[in-house]
Image: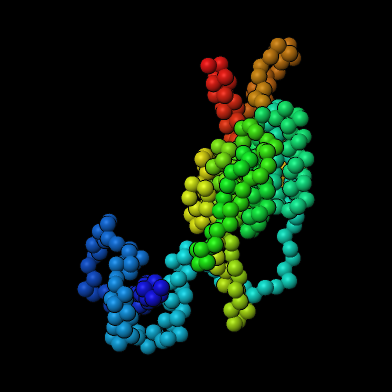
Amino acid sequence: MKLLLAHAVCATTLAVCAADSLGQAAKKPAANVPAQAEPAPRNSPGLRETVDALSETDASQLIQILKETHVSADKLTEAELTRATVQGLLERFGGSVSVLAAPSDATPAPASPLKKEWAQEGVPYLRLGELSPANLTALDGALANFSSGGATALVLDLRATPAGSQFEAAAEVCKRFCPKGRVLFTLKRSRTQEERLLTSNEVPRFQGILVVLVDSNCAGASEAIAATLRSHTKAMVLGQKTQGEAAEFAELPLPSGKLLRVPVGQVVLPEGSPVFPGGLKPDLTVPVPQATTDAVLKAADEKGIKDLITETTRPRMNEAALVAGTNPEIEAYQANQQAKAQKNAPVLRDVLLQRALDLVETLRVYEKKDDRR
């Protein structure tokens, strides 16, 4: 730990001193500066690699030398070195450790109910929403309805599931899909060596093609669901790489009232692969701007998903048009050009859901080929 602290201090102190030296150099006349600086070697080590290569003795001595000889040594007070340590540690933990503002009476986030709808014949769409007891009950009802309706595939949308560490609820969701008797995932606390196994003790309520939708805002329990379903049911995960927060966090108070958010446990899949802190990489990456995702989720709340996944059929010349002396293809082209000229907003489409339905159709084709053999 001492070496980690020393390296964290070194990294930040070196960066601060280098920036200060560069700032002072910029004030000097550039009489002897060559016309073009030599480029740095492509394989030259970065600051992190340079600091990591230092021994604990080197790191401690480096700090002492800077304090005694650097032109800006007066800035290396104990308070500044402490802040450098904190900055270096936060950078090294890559966002998994953060300082939060003091708790306030902020307005709670709006509820995210479960939504269900048939996307096409045999393929229902299910947006999980928040991991609440009410939504779990609604999930059971939806799965029963889908099974009785002849569903052979299911698109499970986790994009509207709020971030959080409700891993028990996440396991309850996974039980509806995973084989009975399996270890779904483990919650590990490295400091206490405590391990908690969450297992499936139910017969799955849906067995068929499963496609899971995620985005870059998915964090915590939703990541555990997507990773577990991929591991146990061979579900395909589509979307963007997730946050990498499949961990239990503690929010510990600081003297000022701020909170230090620290991971104290993490989700580990049965094969030993963690989701924290790297996040879950989808099987098929579909880049979608977050603003577009927010818009399609809102539109689905208001009018359903049909208009978001249905493409307008291109008009074709037909016998009726010939008799009437019109050309629907030219009319459609003119209307499209007029819309472009008026800079009308593009038609909103849920591209991620469209790709999921395309994938379902592809998997169905392969299943039919396997059945014929």
Above or below for 218 versus 65: above
- Work out whether residue 31 can be spotted: yes
Q: Is residue 122 positioned above or below 174 on the image?
A: above
- The picture places residue 192, in percent across and down from the top left corner, at 52, 66
Is residue 36 something that shows in the picture? no
Q: Is residue 15 left or right of residue 361?
A: left
User: Tell me, what colour scheme is on the image?
Assistant: rainbow
Which of 183/219 is in front?
A: 183
Residue occupying the point 57% across, 19% down: 371
Q: Quadrant of the N terminus?
A: bottom left
Q: Residue at x 57, y 69 (%)?
A: 261
Residue occupying image coordinates x 43% and y 76%: 85
User: In this image, 7 relative to 296: left or right?
Assistant: left
The answer to whether residue 60 is above or below residue 306 is below
Q: Quadrant of residue 82?
A: bottom left
Q: Position of residue 284 (x, y in %)?
A: 52, 39
Left or right: residue 365 versus residue 85 is right
Q: Nearer the viewer, residue 250 or 116?
A: 250
